[in-house]
Image (tube, rainbow, N blue to C red):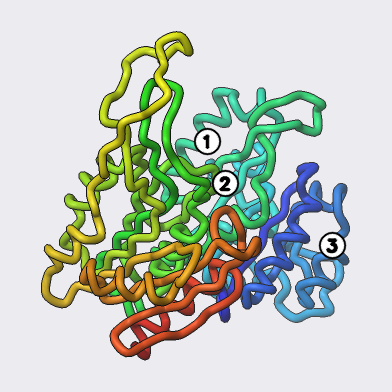
């Protein structure tokens, strides 16, 4: 997904500086070329040799280095600013953030910021009280107004020993944010200029304010489909139920709860060029809903249910010319037979079917095995859900 992209990684003097080495490796594993610029403060936490060894490139720290063995070192901030497709500062201290907001260029990192011709992502990390201070709040506002991307820090246990917001987000979260930023710049691909709607996660059907019918869907497969569509140039809207994983960057996200909520939003986006129904939609909902918690003494031994709207069937019956409709089917037996029948009955173009019989597939897992079914097409895919999502869309839109 980052194959061939050129990233400048800026590292500043925070306790999370060591995590930047893992981020560098993650960029490289995704196919990116990385160069590193550090502040002097960052070298108090991790040596420059670590980053030069990993990046296989000299680390830039000072504008005027003592060793002039490399010609024109002092102009690297200009050449690197022109070279990069993305500039990521992780971690970014309050001090460096203030310098960027004010336009200072007193070290190689801040000078490169001013020279950059690419998007800039800043990942602020500091103690919670510092992050809530008026000065940091003001500087964050300035950076956003200047068009700089900000990845908010996470809450948790901090180096000070206190709990608060200020931790550097996980590597995967930073990479995903980078993908979203680059996707906004990248318009070429099989889905360029197309509107794509993806549904993801579970729905919840409440019987009272605290109890509901649902399923264990994590939203991972749906979010993976949204990311893959985004990376292929699509203008993506993801409509998702309650989930606990990071939302994809570079897409519009709409959060819903019930199947009726989902149906309402899907109808509002039914003119999309591509609709991918990956949500695990509840087939039944309680006939009545109590406004107060149902007490044990008031409960009965049965619960009356009604069917929820068949959203995929509605979409199939209202499909516009040229639209691609992709459904998902999770089965426990006779998977291909049942999924193919679903594709025909719902008038979908494609159905991605998978079984929950294997503990490595289905709800909540990072891996999956999927059979793609179309008109005279049956093809199996295995791997991580992100890999499968790319393979499915590549099969459908590149060679399908």
The image shows residue 363, relative to residue 376, as above or below, that is above
Neighbour class for label 2 at 10 Å: few (<14), some, many (≥20)?
many
Residue 294 rendering spot, x and y as whole percentages? 41, 15
- The image's mark for residue 281 is none
Q: Determine which residue is flagged by label 1.
A: 139
| Farthest-out residue, top | 297
Q: Are marks 1 and 2 in contact (CB under 8 Å)?
A: yes
Q: Are marks 1 and 3 in contact (CB under 8 Å)?
A: no
Q: Quadrant of residue 115?
A: bottom right
The image shows residue 204, relative to residue 201, as above or below, that is above
Q: Are marks 2 and 3 in contact (CB under 8 Å)?
A: no
Asked if residue 375 lies left or right of residue 214, the reply is left
Instruction: Measure the alpha-carbon separation of dots 1 and 2.
Output: 9 Å
Residue 149 rendering spot, x and y as whole percentages? 48, 50
Instruction: Measure the alpha-carbon separation of dots 1 and 3.
Output: 28 Å
* Mark closer to the chain start, 1 or 3: 3
Inspect this view and state whether residue 374 appears: yes
| Front one among 141 and 127 | 127
Tag 1, which secondary structure? Answer: helix
Tag 2, which secondary structure? Answer: helix
| Front one among 24 and 199 | 199
Asked if residue 298 lies left or right of residue 350, the reply is right
Q: Determine which residue is flagged by label 3.
A: 48
Q: Quadrant of residue 315?
A: bottom left
- Residue at the spot 12% in from the left edge and 63% down from the top edge: 318
Asked if residue 192 lies left or right of residue 37, the reply is left
Q: Determine which residue is flagged by label 2.
A: 100
Quadrant where the N terminus lies? bottom right
Neighbour class for label 1 at 10 Å: few (<14), some, many (≥20)?
some
């Amino acid at each position: 997904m980052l194959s061939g992209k050129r990233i400048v990684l800026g590292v500043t003097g925070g306790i999370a500086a060591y995590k930047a080495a893992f981020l560098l490796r993650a960029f490289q594993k995704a196919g990116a070329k990385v160069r590193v610029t550090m502040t002097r403060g960052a070298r108090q936490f991790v040596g420059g040799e670590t980053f030069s060894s990993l990046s296989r490139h000299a680390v830039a720290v000072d504008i005027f280095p003592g060793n002039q063995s490399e010609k024109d070192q002092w102009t690297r901030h200009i050449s690197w600013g022109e070279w990069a497709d993305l500039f990521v500062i992780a971690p970014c201290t309050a001090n460096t953030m203030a310098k960027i907001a004010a336009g200072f260029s007193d070290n190689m990192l801040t000078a490169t910021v001013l020279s950059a011709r690419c998007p800039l992502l800043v990942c602020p990390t500091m103690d919670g009280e510092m992050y809530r201070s008026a000065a940091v709040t003001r500087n964050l506002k300035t950076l956003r107004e200047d068009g700089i991307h900000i990845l908010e820090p996470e809450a948790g246990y901090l180096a000070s020993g206190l709990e608060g917001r200020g931790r550097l987000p996980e590597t995967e979260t930073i990479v995903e944010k980078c993908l979203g930023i680059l996707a906004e710049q990248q318009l070429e691909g099989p889905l360029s200029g197309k509107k794509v709607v993806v549904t993801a996660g579970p729905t919840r059907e409440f019987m009272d304010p605290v109890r509901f019918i649902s399923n264990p869907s994590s939203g991972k497969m749906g979010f993976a489909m949204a990311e893959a569509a985004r990376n292929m140039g699509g203008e993506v809207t993801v409509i998702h139920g309650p989930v606990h994983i990071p939302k994809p960057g570079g897409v519009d996200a709409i959060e819903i709860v019930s199947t009726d909520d989902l149906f309402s939003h899907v109808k509002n986006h039914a003119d999309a060029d591509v609709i991918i129904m990956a949500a695990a939609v509840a087939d039944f909902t309680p006939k009545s809903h109590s406004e107060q918690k149902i007490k044990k003494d008031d409960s009965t031994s049965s619960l009356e249910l009604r069917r929820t709207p068949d959203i995929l069937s509605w979409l199939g019956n209202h499909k516009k010319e040229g639209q691609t409709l992709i459904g998902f089917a999770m089965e426990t037996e006779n998977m291909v037979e049942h999924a193919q029948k679903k594709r025909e009955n719902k008038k979908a173009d494609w159905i991605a079917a998978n079984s929950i019989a294997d503990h490595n597939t289905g709800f909540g897992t990072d891996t999956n095995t999927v059979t793609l079914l179309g008109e005279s097409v049956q093809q199996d895919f295995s791997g991580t859900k992100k890999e499968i999502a790319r393979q499915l869309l590549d099969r459908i839109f590149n060679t399908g």
